[in-house]
Amino acid sequence: MNQLNLDIATRVIDSALQKGRELELAPLCVVVLDAGGHLIAAKREDGASLLRPEIATGKAYGCLAMGFGGRELARRAQTSAPFLTALSGLTGGKVVPVPGGVLVRSSDGHLLGAVGVSGDASPKDEVCAVAGIAAVDLVADTGDAA
């Protein structure tokens, strides 16, 4: 597989939301972006707060912009605030540097896109993103070594 499509993105989202319900998390929003940062699909659960779609998109977009998962982006944000300020300015504030943004890779490591989840604590959001990606037999890149 060399790209994500609507069917796969929908399955990722539905599986991520199912994981959130299994874990009894707060209402979630899940987005899937292609490798160019374009929206493929998004779902916002009933009761998810107002900015959840934008936050989920920012988590995924930041991963794509920098080429690594949300955990590494969060680490870099903590150690290099001036760089993050510049990155935020360059992207028009689109980057959200916390866990919950996960790159999607093929089994051979090819970048296909990213998933962003928002609604609960960022590490819990990330668990849902990883579950969604795994459900379609793709590789989740959180920014931590496997």
Image (spheres, rainbow, N blue to C red):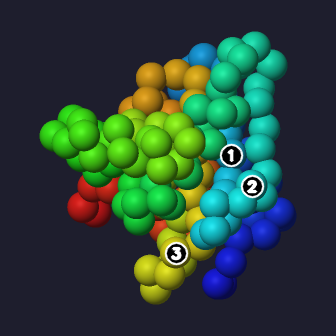
**Measuring 83% from the left and 64% from the top, which residue is drawn there?**
7
- Mark 3 → mark 1, Cα distance in angstroms: 16 Å
* Left or right, residue 5 beside residue 133: right
Residue 129 makes an appearance in the image: no
Q: Element at badge 1?
A: strand
Residue occupied by mark 2: 39
Disc 2 vs disc 1: Cβ atoms closer than 8 Å?
yes
Disc 2 vs disc 3: Cβ atoms closer than 8 Å?
no
Residue occupied by mark 1: 31
Density class for disc 1 (Cα within 10 Å; few <14, some 14-19, many ≥20) is many
- Mark 2 → mark 3, Cα distance in angstroms: 15 Å
When asked about the image quadrant of residue 24, the answer is: top right
Going from N to C along the chain, the mark reached first, 2 or 1, is 1
Query: Please, what is the three-letter code of the amino acid marked with disc 3?
Result: Leu
* Left or right, residue 126 beside residue 119: left
Residue 64 makes an appearance in the image: yes
Quadrant for the N terminus, please. Answer: bottom right
